[in-house]
Image (cartoon, rainbow, N blue to C red):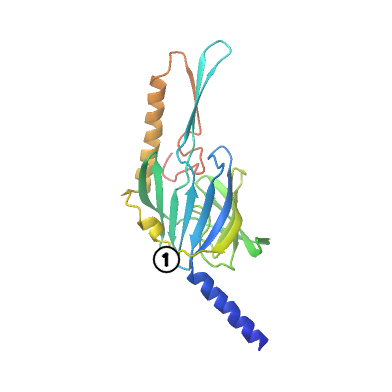
Amino acid sequence: MIKLNFTFSFLFFCATFYAQVNRVDYYVLTKNTIDTTNVRTFLLFNKNESIFIWNSILNSENNELKKGEEGEVKFTKILNDTIGLRVLNLFASDSLKIIDKILQDKYKFDEEKNIQWDIINESKFVGGYKCLKATTFFRGRGYIVWFTEEIPISSGPWKLNGLPGLILEAIDDRNEVSFKLKSIKSTTLKSIRNLYDCFQFEKITLRKFIEKKDNYHKENHKEIISKLPRGTNVEVLNFSTRNGIEKIIEWVK
């Protein structure tokens, strides 16, 4: 009788857990890619879908003028990359739905789910959940992640997805990007899809978005250089997406 009561209680917990919207908060750290000071990142999910939300100032730019040893002016421009303002993952779909922006212009575009994983026979506990290890190479970075089959949804931080359980921790092989579990809790939110559908932004392709973003950086760079005094030495750090979290875009050489 005790065993039957325990089984019923466990099944009731699972049914309740996946029927509602739950929230996963992550600690996020990056090195030389995005300023994550006071940034909050979190994932909302139910049994059918999830949305990852990145709260930060996007596409921020820092300009610095310094005088050199011989009196010349040295100009340094730092462009900070983004990782997607909102990432909607419909588990039954073959693509992610992204909201991102270039300055104040916001766009919607779809991105195929094409991450290939190697699951490794190693385990550890993260936040009280037993997790398995998996590795992948995505957009120019190797990732080691820990996911739990105790929460069997194919989602995780940012665009990382495709495993038979929720990703609770992800670290790249350069120790430049990491997402680590902070907490998991239930919410009173009724809908996830509305957090994407409520925005009426221009819909374009991923290729077009990358093209617009790169063109913005190039034109902005030219404009600033044209306004500098003669003899100014110019350095550009973290230009465009190629030195950000996404170091390689499949079709961009």
Q: Is residue 41 visible?
A: yes
Q: Is residue 67 above or below residue 20?
A: above
Relative depth, front residue between 226 and 186 = 186
- The extreme front residue here reads 188
**Residue density around tag 1, few if under 14, some if 14–19, many if 20 or more, within 10 Å:** few
| Quadrant the C terminus occupies | top left
Q: Is residue 175 above or below residue 91?
A: above
Relative depth, front residue between 214 and 34 = 34
Q: Which image quarter: residue 88?
A: bottom left
Q: Residue at x 36, y 51 (%)?
A: 109
| Quadrant the N terminus occupies | bottom right
Relative depth, front residue between 87 and 55 = 55
- The extreme bottom residue here reads 1
Q: Residue at x 41, y 57 (%)?
A: 195
Q: How many marks?
A: 1
Determine whether, in the image, residue 6 is placed left or right of residue 114. right
Q: Is residue 12 above or below residue 98?
A: below
Residue 152 percent coordinates (x, y) = 54, 68
Q: Is residue 61 above or below residue 10?
A: above
Q: Residue at x 56, y 44 (%)?
A: 38
| Residue at image mark 1 | 92
Residue 81 percent coordinates (x, y) = 48, 39
Relative depth, front residue between 218 and 99 = 99
Q: Residue at x 44, y 54 (%)?
A: 87
Amino acid type of the residue that numbered disc 1 sits on in the rendered structure = Ala
Q: Is residue 145 visible?
A: no
Residue 136 percent coordinates (x, y) = 56, 53
Determine whether, in the image, residue 205 is placed left or right of residue 230. left
User: Tag 1's secondary structure?
Assistant: loop
